[in-house]
Image: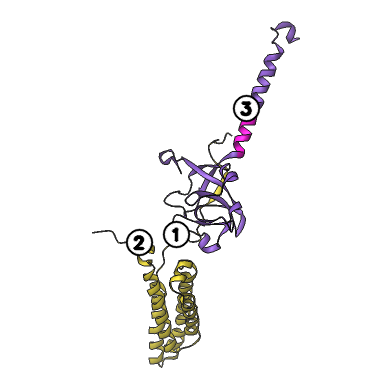
């Protein structure tokens, strides 16, 4: 009925819109597999990272190379794998396939000094930047 | 209700078991000194009721001493401190045992030995920068 009353849109218009929408959704989905956003809990990365801060993280880098000393990474807690830790890479042993994680505040941090080294493969996400609070926004 | 799309759902842990980070063997030392003094008073008294009170309070204080030694041992000292002081574990272990002995007996020598071991822990705490790292510094005048 409506096609009789209104002006008929060319079929190609729908196809183009559909494709654009699909491509957009695919791009968002793809981006979400490369990037994610996380919230910091705990004090062990002070003063670099404080509880409640929001960070952008990505996981493409470590598909191509091992984490490097000084980078801040996300890794499963070896003592409780459902928890995800955020720590700085203190040393990497490529031959053994392990790395050590330290908090920036050694006094309060529970890290490799307590639980030892972890497999390199367990550090998948690299911290890229802090975007909130805006006043502390920075690349990391 | 709309939630802020910028707010992360995923939480990552900058984990710390002890958020306060304040450690000082003095806490153990004061409790152990109480035990020592109480045992002096216990030995000097003939009042049975007083002596019973001495035993009760001494056991409480000894238990607190043990707790504070354990906090130093488990929470303050880190593997690099053990590398620096190979007898660290042995000293803390002996100090805990000495605190147990003070709890069990009325032997003042046990309390003296406990104080000596706490002083050894204190030396290691000082040598690893404990006073500067774990205590709040007094505001500069």
Q: CA distance from mark 1 to mark 2?
A: 16 Å
Question: From the viewer's perspective, is A121 left or right of B53?
Answer: right
Residue at 66 percent across and 19 percent down: it is A17
Label 3: which residue?
A24
- The quarter of the rendered structure image containing the N terminus of chain B is top right
Residue A31 counted in the magenta span = yes
N-terminal-most mark, 1 or 3: 3
In the picture, one chain is purple; tell me its letter. A
Q: Nearer the viewer, residue B83 or B134?
A: B83
In the picture, one chain is yellow; tell me its letter. B
Query: In which image quadrant can residue B3 be found?
Result: top right
Is disc 1 surrounded by few (<14), some (14 to 19) or many (20+) residues within 10 Å? some
* Element type where label 2 sits in the image: loop
The x, y position of residue B130, in whole percent, is 38, 67
Are dots 1 and 3 in contact, CB under 8 Å? no
Q: Residue furthest left?
A: B141
Q: Nearer the viewer, residue B1 or B139?
A: B139
Number of disc labels: 3
Q: Nearer the viewer, residue A64 or B44?
A: A64
Question: From the viewer's perspective, is B116 left or right of A66?
Answer: left
Residue B36 counted in the magenta span = no
Label 1: which residue?
A106
């Amino acid at each position: 009925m409506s096609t009789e009353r209104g002006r008929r849109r060319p079929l190609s218009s729908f196809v183009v819109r559909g494709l654009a929408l699909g491509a957009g959704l695919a791009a968002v989905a793809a981006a979400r597999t490369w990037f994610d956003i996380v919230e910091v809990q705990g004090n062990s990365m002070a003063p670099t990272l404080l509880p409640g801060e929001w960070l952008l993280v990505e996981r493409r880098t470590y598909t191509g190379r091992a984490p490097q000393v000084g980078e801040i990474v996300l890794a499963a807690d070896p003592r409780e794998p459902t928890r995800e830790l955020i720590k700085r890479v203190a040393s990497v042993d490529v031959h053994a396939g392990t790395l050590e994680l330290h908090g920036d505040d050694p006094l309060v941090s529970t890290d490799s000094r307590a639980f030892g080294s972890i497999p390199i493969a367990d550090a998948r996400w690299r911290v890229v930047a802090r975007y909130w609070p805006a006043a502390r926004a920075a690349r990391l | 209700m709309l939630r802020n799309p910028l707010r992360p759902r995923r939480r990552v842990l900058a984990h710390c078991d002890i958020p306060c980070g304040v450690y000082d063997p003095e806490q153990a030392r004061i409790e152990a000194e109480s035990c020592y003094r109480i045992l002096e008073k216990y030995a000097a008294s003939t009042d049975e009721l007083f002596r019973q009170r001495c035993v009760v309070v001494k056991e409480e204080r000894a238990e607190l001493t043990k707790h504070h030694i354990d906090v130093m041992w488990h929470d303050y000292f880190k593997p690099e401190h053990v590398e620096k002081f190979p007898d660290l574990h042995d000293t803390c272990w002996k100090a805990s045992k000495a605190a147990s002995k003070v709890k069990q007996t009325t032997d003042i020598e046990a309390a003296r030995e406990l104080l000596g071991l706490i002083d050894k822990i204190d030396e290691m705490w000082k040598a690893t920068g404990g006073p500067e790292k774990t205590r709040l510094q007094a505001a500069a005048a």
